[in-house]
Structure formats: C-alpha cells, structure tokens
C-alpha cells in the first residue's frame, strides 16, 4: 500500500489509500527503488528475497508522541485511580509525573539507556520503525540533558530511528512550586545548549490546569521558536484551556491530546494546518468517558495522527496496534484513516514526511510484513501482535 503524492492526509484524503495487489518491491541501499507486479519481479535480480505471498505489507508504523526515557514505574497509582483520585490531584500531591521525576533523577544514564532500549525494542516488535521521544522527567538541567542524550544515543545505536523533543516544561518541580515563572526561565536557559548540540528538534509544554497556563505556554514556546525550534503542545488533555487555539496561533507542527478542544479550536487547527495528534490510549487508561472529536476534526480538514503517548503514568503501553483499535472503536475512525494516521501523517508530525511514512520510490524502506491478508484486519483483531517481519532501511531487524 502507498499513499500517492506527498503531504499529510487531511479531510476526505484521510480516507484514501493506494493499494497494490500482488505487488513486489525492490530495495536498493535502504530506499525503495521500484514497485512492480510479482510477475515483473521474477526478472529482477536480488541478493535477498522476502516472500510476502498472501500477506499485507505496509510502511513501518511511526509513533509521534512518547515519553520513552524514564526511571521506575507507577503501578502503585492504580489503586488511587480506582478510588477515583483524579490524575491532576495525584500530581498536586507530589505523585504522578513528580514521582517519575524522582526515579529519573536517581537513575544513571546507563540505567536509563538500558531501560529505554527494552521499551524501544518492544515498540519495534509491534511494527514501529520511527519514534518521537520527549524529555520532561528531569525538570532540572542535568537530568533533562541526560534524558535527551539517552534518546540521541538510542537513535545512533538502535534499529528504530528517534526524534527528540525537549519537554522541560512538563510539571513544576517541588523546588519551584511557588515560582513557576522562575522555573520556566531555568528551562528556557537550556535551549541554546540543546540547540547547539542538536539534542532535540522540538520543544513541547504541558498546558493544563495546575501545570502551565496559556500565557506561560505562549511565552515559553515563543522563546523556543525564536531559537529555531518547531513547537508542540500538550493541549486540552484534561481541561479545555484553549491549547488548540494557542497551537494555531504559534503555528505549532502538532497539537497533542485535544480531548476538550472546542469546535472553534478545531477550525483554527485546520486553518493553521496544525496536525492533531490524538492519544486515545490515554483516555482509556485514565478511565475517561469522552475522547477527542476525531470525526469533527477530519470533517473540518484537520490532518490527524495517532500515537501511544507511552509513559509510566497515563498510558503505559508500547503497542501502537492497540491504539489503532481504540481509534476505530472510540474515535470512530475508518481503517483507512487509521493507517494514514500512523504512517504518513505521523511522519509529517515529526518533520520527516518527505522521506518516510509511505511506500514509494526514493522513500526510506521501512516496512512491516503482517500476519494478515488485508489492512482492515489490524485494528479489528485487537490485543495481540500481528507483526511477522520488520524491515528497517532495507534490512530485516525483527522476525
Ligand atoms: O501525555 N500529560 C502529561 N504528560 C503525559 C503523562 C506523563 C505522566 O503521567 O508521567 C501525557 O499524558
Ligand atoms: Fe504525552
């Protein structure tokens, strides 16, 4: 399957896929060289052949929103959640994100590297070939840079490619609890070093009640833009503060969550061509009854992508296939929309739309061969792994 010409898919185009039946692919030096029929392919010379008979082949999945690098875990919060203690209340009491901050500060760089390798390898096994990873569990210079270095080292050493996002503005740490502005100044002071060492390509902020306000988010992200970063926003995840409108105003590359976004906010995202990154696994795991209005977004011409939001608190899963099922059941997205969301649109949401996310000549040969005969089967049959083989830059990296 490929998606024709380049650009994120929006509106009705999200419901279109190009499907090649009985097709064959040639890969040269890590990129797709040609697509033909299996009859033509009998004439092609090749060092390695992979038999795909009767199987679905798609672009490698792309997970454009994860909090991959962190210390510890938070299973002890489950009973609090069951008692009805809200996510933001756990955070206010010094738990939640702040409990992961303690564990991440206490972990060595090597420990974080080993732990993140484990999670990333699991993502690969689920068919994910490119991942965005955010910092945000340091909330101080040393640990934020440690997280970013781990993500960069993984990008160098692991078969999965990573892009990095600086999310130093993820929560207000205990030491600055009475002075969030001062804390944002400290995070802002890291931007030059992060830029000069190319430790992150994007800057993000958690714009939420009790975390960072619209005004604080605007101020911080404007500074990041002025330093040459593309920006993302955790927007309207729990309370509808107007994060989508801010994303549009700042020309963000993507806005994330958008559960409480108003119709006006959706229109603004469409006009400003901000990609909506929806995270239905998080709504599921926080036991929410309402989900982002994906149908409305698509109707208004917004390009939608989907991600796991993999993190130790609000969505501990590496399984993007499961998110595809949530998108079908809870967001009412069609199978075609879902496939566009986790491939081509995900690539655009992390600035890599020109080189990956579709199967076409000259695109990176990141492919998944599935234990399925058709694309509708993957969101349909849920909770198991359908991957047979993962190919990264033309090489088999998982089978
Ligand atoms: O996207 N909302 C903020 N950040 C994460 C959760 C992080 C955590 O709970 O550790 C999210 O849901
Ligand atoms: Fe997140």
Image (cartoon, rainbow, N blue to C red):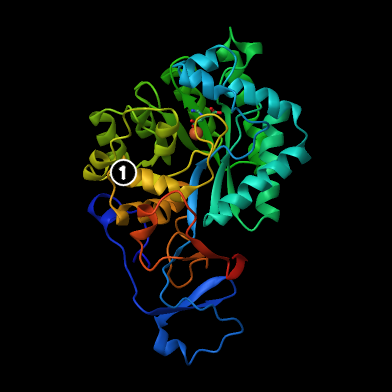
Residue 326 visible to an observer of this rendering: yes
Residue at the image point whose x is 37% and y is 79% from the top: 22
Q: Position of residue 184 (x, y in %)?
A: 58, 20
For ligand 1, tell me if the residue under mark 1 lies within 8 Å.
Answer: no
Q: Which residue is mark 1?
A: 329
Residue at the image point whose x is 46% and y is 16% from the top: 83
Q: Quadrant of the C terminus?
A: bottom right
Instruction: Note whether 296 is above or below 350 in the view shown.
Output: above
Q: Decide if residue 390 is on the left or right side of residue 209.
A: right
Label 1, residues with CA under 10 Å away: few <14, some 14-19, many ≥20: some
Q: Quadrant of the N terminus?
A: bottom left
What is the residue that sits farthest to the bottom in this orientation? 43
Q: Decide if residue 132 is on the left or right side of residue 142.
A: left
Q: Decide if residue 267 is on the left or right side of residue 69.
A: left
Residue at the image point whose x is 29% and y is 47% from the top: 333
Element assignment for label 1: helix
Q: Position of residue 139 (x, y in %)?
A: 64, 24
Q: Position of residue 395 (x, y in %)?
A: 61, 70
Residue at the image point whose x is 32% and y is 47% from the top: 328
Q: Position of residue 112 (x, y in %)?
A: 72, 38
Q: Which image quadrant is residue 236 in?
A: top left
Q: Which image quadrant is residue 259 in?
A: top left
Residue 139 visible to an observer of this rendering: no
How many marks can you see? 1
Q: Decide if residue 138 is on the left or right side of residue 317.
A: right
Q: Closer to the camera, 50 or 206?
A: 50
Q: Closer to the camera, 112 or 171?
A: 112
Q: Which image quadrant is residue 134 in?
A: top right
């Amino acid at each position: 399957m490929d998606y024709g010409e380049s650009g994120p898919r929006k509106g009705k185009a999200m419901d279109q896929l190009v499907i090649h039946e009985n097709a064959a692919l040639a890969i040269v030096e890590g990129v797709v060289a040609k697509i033909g029929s299996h009859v033509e392919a009998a004439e092609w010379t090749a060092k390695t052949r992979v038999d795909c008979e009767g199987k679905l082949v798609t672009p490698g999945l792309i997970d454009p929103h994860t909090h991959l690098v962190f210390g510890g875990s938070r299973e002890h919060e489950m009973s609090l959640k069951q008692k009805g203690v809200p996510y933001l209340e756990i955070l206010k009491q010094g738990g939640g994100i702040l409990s992961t901050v303690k564990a991440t500060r206490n972990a060595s760089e090597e420990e974080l590297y080993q732990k993140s390798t484990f999670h990333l390898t699991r993502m690969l096994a689920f068919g994910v070939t490119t991942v965005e990873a955010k910092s945000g569990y340091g909330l101080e210079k040393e640990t934020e840079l440690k997280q970013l270095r781990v993500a960069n080292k993984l990008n160098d050493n692991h078969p999965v490619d990573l892009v990095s996002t600086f999310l130093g503005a993820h929560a207000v740490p205990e030491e600055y609890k009475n002075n969030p502005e001062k804390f944002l100044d400290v995070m802002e002071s890291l931007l030059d070093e992060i830029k000069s060492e190319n430790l992150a390509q994007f800057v993000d902020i958690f714009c939420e009640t009790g975390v960072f306000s619209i005004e604080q988010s605007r101020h911080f992200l404007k500074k990041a833009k002025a330093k040459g970063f593309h920006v993302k926003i955790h927007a309207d995840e729990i309370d509808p503060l107007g994060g989508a409108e801010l994303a549009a105003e700042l020309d963000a590359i993507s806005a994330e969550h958008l559960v409480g976004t108003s119709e006006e906010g959706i229109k603004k995202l469409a006009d400003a061509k901000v990609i909506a990154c929806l995270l239905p696994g998080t709504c599921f795991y926080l036991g929410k009854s309402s989900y982002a209005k994906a149908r409305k977004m698509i109707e208004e011409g917004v390009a939608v992508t989907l991600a796991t939001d993999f993190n130790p608190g609000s969505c501990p899963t590496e399984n993007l296939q499961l998110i595809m099922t949530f998108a079908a059941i809870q967001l009412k997205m069609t199978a075609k929309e879902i496939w566009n969301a986790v491939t081509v649109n995900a690539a655009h949401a992390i600035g890599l739309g020109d080189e990956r996310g579709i199967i076409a000549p000259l695109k990176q040969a990141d492919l998944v061969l599935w234990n399925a005969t058709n694309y509708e089967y993957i969101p349909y049959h849920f909770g198991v792994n359908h991957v047979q083989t993962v190919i990264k830059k033309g090489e088999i990296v998982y089978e």
